[in-house]
Image (spheres, helix red, strand yellow):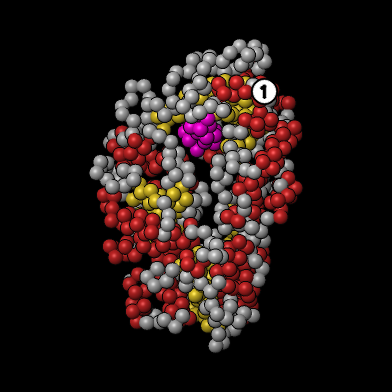
Amino acid sequence: MSDGRKASAPALEIKGLNVYYGASHALQGVDLGLNGGVLSVVGRNGMGKTTLCKAIMGLEPASSGTISFGGQVLNGKSPAEIARMGVGYVPQGRRLWRSLTVDEHLRLVARSGGAWTIERIYDSFPRLAERKSNGGAQLSGGEQQMLAIGRALLLNPRLLVMDEPTEGLAPVIVSHVEDMLLKLAAEGDIDVLVIEQNIGVATSVAETVAVMVNGRVSRIVPSRDLAADRDLQQRLLGVGQHAHDEDADAEPTQSDMQAGSLSQQYQAASHPIPQITRWSSIEGAGNKPIACGTEPDQPGILVLGAMSRTATEIRTTRALLRDAGHKVTTVDISTAADPASLADVPAHQLAAWHPRGAAGIHDGVTPDPRLGVAEALERFLTARPGVEGVLAILDLGEAAIIVPRIIATLGQVPVLVVAPAASSDLLTMVTGGRLLLFPADGDAGLTRAVRAGAQAMAELLAPVVAGNLGARVAGHVALISGLAGGARAASVTAMLGLNHRCVTYAPTRAGVDELKLAIASGVVKAVIDLDQSDIAAQMLGGVIDTVPDRIEELCTADCPYVSVLGGGDLIYTHRSDGPGISIRKSVRAEAETVGRSYAAALNASTGRITVIVPAAPQGSPAFWTGDAFVSVFEESGQRKLVRSPGAASSGETMQYLARALDESLKGDTPGRRSAVASVYGASAP
């Protein structure tokens, strides 16, 4: 960091910060400053360290007080805005995508022109370079932490907030992280706030350590004093004491902090700390809600819905997921509290997470009580670690209001929604397509969609291990679906769930390797290719890193291959104005090149192939792709071409797909065609 920036404003300045969880006071008047370099924050479990990180990053709103970065106030800004300002975050738990490779993780966030590049990350973490083609789920804990740190550094932040970066790591990896932090401090371009339980790490990487007790900064201690004084560690942190010892709040001795040893920037607050915990109720408040009274438990899969309307479906979903071996937490999002609700988190407990409690939902001022429910749910999810997935059973209004906040809060956690079919376009628009929608209309449609959604969630989260793959997904239909195929994958899963088990695979290196393993194990009875955007990326340049010859490898003689042409007209590239990706439509020459290339690859394959070409507006990139494909594709006894009068995700195309699959599997029956037609209200072809 430059001397000018040091003189102008601290890298991080926190004054009087208060954060509440319902009626519980999580951060209590926190004052903390970082002029530059590295500052460590230590404390026992439950003292508010992670909440402090979340408040800095905008993931948890501050009730009062200010948080400033380089003189700019962060209060009220979204996490995305804070990241764009130059604050990086390495969260506790890493939060990686299971099926994206190491290289894909890095390319998704890489920016041009910064000091940190993908090549520099690989130089700093050679193990990542060796594992660049492995998926996130295939990495060790240390490798996952390296990737999480590398991902944050690629944003070229000026301030890096790291929450427990060495938690659960082997000593050799801990040393590597220490060395990296020391190097960052020496280079001076990035300031670092490190939350640590490991006293050795905390004192070795920073000159100063802040100690948190019950939601407050209790002491600011020179690292050398804390590292050398075992008694001081015991008094402040309970190191070496039993859990029932309560000496952490004792007043410091004269030797704890030598006068003048710290700059004014690091002086601790002078007010005494009362004998309370950070979960104590606000003075004068009513009874504390049960949901906020203890540290949050690990919830597993969350099943959300209004028990007043969908209690049967919620209980069915919970039973199906528990039968599949998953931990499930049900959450009642009803706007009218029912004390007799059978949900794990009843509506009145969820309402307690609103900043104003139940009044924030039922005060008669909020234009729609569902807005209050959404805000309470967002705070509830932020405080709940370990959410593996969300399956929400919603109506149209609930879906439009609640789903975007779920996705924004949980990031890459899979979200599956059972909602009316009319929600599809709206949800795709407000979430960028980052969910799977199971259309449900009428009682019968709702029951089918709920069962299909539960099955899809169970399959999505079950680990794929060669030894138990057959027992887990024996005889399933593999769906190839990436960034462009989400809506089609949801429609296909809901439709085929009557007779087939569907498992989705991404068209990435890790996803294709996983699918090849499943095919080789004999547990895939058919492959349905719903998305060729990876082929466009491979030929025209894009963020999707796939296997060059995936068509040849997946079109085998023993496994029917059914394809719906789509996605080849879209190119996913890095955003020029920040992290993330953008989409552009291909021009005519590009679209035609993709269509011809895909057809040629299928012509060279030996498997049983059926390709469905959906209708597209004349003169559109999708039309050019389809037209070029048809001109090159060679029909034969093994290869069939079918034209659909509908768009790629339409009911007509889905019917043709179901018919083609059944014919490939020799199971084309009138009952099957009738079932397919009933889903979309049309006659079977």
Q: Secondary structure at mark 1?
A: helix
The answer to whether residue 573 of the structure is visible from this angle is no
Q: Position of residue 543 (x, y in %)?
A: 63, 57
Residue drawn where x is 64% and y is 61% of the image: 545
Foreground of the two, 123 or 595: 123
465 sits left or right of 227 in the view: left
Q: Quadrant of residue 237?
A: top right
Q: Residues within 10 Å of mark 1 (few under 14, many from 20)?
A: few
Q: Position of residue 453 (x, y in %)?
A: 40, 60
Magenta residues, start to end: 44-63
Residue drawn where x is 52% and y is 35% of the image: 50
Q: Quadrant of the N terminus?
A: top right
Foreground of the two, 657 or 176: 176
Q: Quadrant of residue 154?
A: top right
| Residue pointed to by mark 1 | 228
53 sits left or right of 355 in the view: right
